[in-house]
Amino acid sequence: MTFTKWVRFGAVLLAATITLGRTEAALFPGEAVVTCYSDEKTNGPVVATFDIRDPAGHSAPLGSTNSPWNLPHRLTWSRADLQGNEVFGIALDDAPNPNIYLTSTAIYKSSSVNQSAPGTGKVFKLDGTSGAVTVFATLPQGSNPNGQGLGNIAYDAPNHQFFVTDFYDGRVHRISSTGLLLGTYDPFQAFGSYANTAGGFAPLGERLWGVGTFEGRRSANRQIFREARPAAATTSARRIRPVALWLAPATP
């Protein structure tokens, strides 16, 4: 019997046991999926698979210049491949050849970076066998042309469903394994009872980002989510909140 374990670190996902394929395997055991900013290049990479199994062998050589370097990343998908979207969140499902899921984002906009691609409500799926890109789901967004984008995504393996946080409405959306929107959860004030920011984002204190699932006591499946920043003061601690999930499997 083969056991598969996924370890997630923000916008980096490590594969412990996997056999993906494009023209070659997209991931090997111990490799990672990473998202990044395109640097305003239409064909700039926004997601890649990285070979981190041999750090010494894949590190840039020290103490010399103009030396050959065995680049650690193998396969990439560009902003153009993802319909002009920048992406951040990553999840993998438990298919025999696991698929990669990515969330559109607007988080790269800052005082030093002028991200031109608007955030959208799109969740993309990279096929685990062919590497083909499709829109898996589209979640609510405001009318602001700059777009708010999504926060993060997590796969709930016991119930074969996904959870995605949304920067626009401050909600957690539940999506089936086929991309069907099953429901939403608003942990704070009801959406519409407060004014969004000028950019259309849910205000601080309502804006969710991180999300994940784990099995708690009595095998209860729980969802956890993290605020982007609390409302009261930018220096106060961000909060991580657990929520008990309905245990019945989702129906696609």
Image (tube, grey):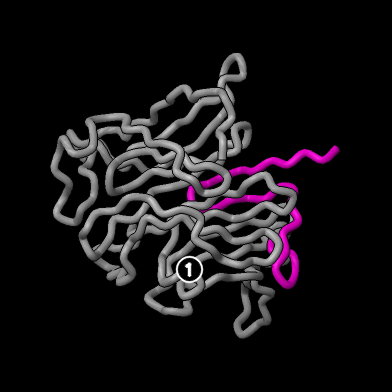
Q: Residue at x 63, y 50 (%)?
A: 14
**Residue 235 in view here:** no
Label 1 Cα crowd, 10 Å radius (few <14 / some 14-19 / many 20+): many
Which quarter of the image is occupied by the C terminus? Answer: top right
Residue 15 part of the magenta-drawn span: yes
Q: Which residue is mark 1?
A: 82
Q: Judge whether residue 23 can be spotted in this image.
A: yes
- Up/down of 202 relative to 86, above or below: above
The one nearer the camera, 58 or 230, is 230
Identity of the residue drawn at 67% across and 44% down: 94
Question: Residue at position x 42%, y 41% from top?
Answer: 210
Q: Position of residue 242 (x, y in %)?
A: 43, 25
Secondary structure of residue under mark 1 = loop
Q: Quadrant of residue 189?
A: top left
Task: Please name the amino acid that badge 1 sits on.
Answer: Leu
Give x and y (percent) for residue 66.
61, 85
Residue 20, horizontal then vertical, whole percent = 72, 59
User: What is the quadrant of the N terminus in the image?
Assistant: top right
Q: Is residue 44 above or below residue 15?
A: below
Stretch in magenta: 1-26
3 w.r.t. 91: above or below: above
Q: Residue furthest bottom?
A: 66
